[in-house]
Amino acid sequence: MTLEEHEHASVVTHALAQHVLSDLRNVETSQVGFRKGLVKLGRLCGYELIDSRFPTATGTVETPLAETATTRVSGMEDVVIVNVLRAATPLVEGLLKAFPTARQGVISASRDEEAGMGDEGEFPISVQYVKLPEITQDDTVIIADPMLATGSTMVTVLDEILSGEPPETCVVLSAVSAPPGLERVTDQFPDVELVTVSVDDELDEDGFIVPGLGDAGDRAFRTT
């Protein structure tokens, strides 16, 4: 297993995931390279979640020559992946390679950059659209957002998702996180598991992660 437990999050230390993250951080990486990197990172993180969070069951199968023991992953049919639009779209594409039968939901939520960051390090959040499948107690819900900065957006998203029947497991997956965001989500949703590929140093005065990787949505979709 290549997940290390930190104060507020589990960090994916898999060598290839860290390699991909290094390319994503590089300002010279093209739009296509950035988007493909997020897809690859989503797939790798999905495999890590399967290895660390899903039980296995043993059985047998007949090969063309003999009967042999098998191991299968349980619970793969009870996965809901929530795409926090728009930046998470490539990351979700990768996750679906690991969880091809997952039910999917989308939430369009964004912070008001013009309002600026409040005294307690939070932004006002606007939710434009929510479409979620039914979520039951048997489900594992994975909420994907490449950047967990102040945690303002994620807290709002979690309020939407967890307003009904709570799932068995809820995981927030990010490529890069900052300590203030991890702390805010943990304080308000202590039962939610946080998984990230890096916990970076800090937020700047505008609420951006440093060193970070820039605006993931802009870099993936070539907008400014």
Image (cartoon, rainbow, N blue to C red):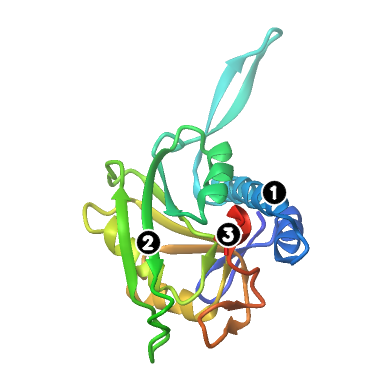
Of residues 159 and 221, the one nearer the viewer is: 221
The amino acid sitting under disc 1 is Val
Which numbered dot is residue 109? Answer: 2
| 70 to 45, vertically: above or below | above
The amino acid sitting under disc 3 is Thr
- Distance from disc 1 to disc 3, alpha carbons, whole Å, reads 13 Å
Query: At 28% from the left edge and 64% from the top edge, which residue is drawn?
Result: 159
Q: Secondary structure at mark 3?
A: loop
Q: Position of residue 125 (x, y in %)?
A: 34, 71
Front position among marks 1 and 3: 3
Quadrant location of the N terminus in the rendered image: bottom right
Which numbered dot is residue 116? Answer: none
Quadrant location of the C terminus in the rendered image: bottom right
Q: Secondary structure at mark 2?
A: strand
Decide if residue 86 is on the left or right side of residue 71: left
Query: At 36% from the left edge and 65% from the top edge, which residue is drawn?
Result: 191
Q: Which residue is mark 1?
A: 32
Of residues 64 and 107, the one nearer the viewer is: 107
Label 2 crowd (10 A; few <14 / some 14-19 / many >=20)? some
Query: At 78% from the left edge and 63% from the top edge, which residue is drawn?
Result: 28
- For marks 3 and 2 on the same chain, the one whose residue lies earlier in the sequence: 2
- For marks 2 and 1 on the same chain, the one whose residue lies earlier in the sequence: 1
Label 3 crowd (10 A; few <14 / some 14-19 / many >=20)? few
The amino acid sitting under disc 2 is Ala
- For marks 1 and 3 on the same chain, the one whose residue lies earlier in the sequence: 1
- Distance from disc 2 to disc 1, alpha carbons, whole Å, reads 24 Å
Q: Which residue is mark 3?
A: 223
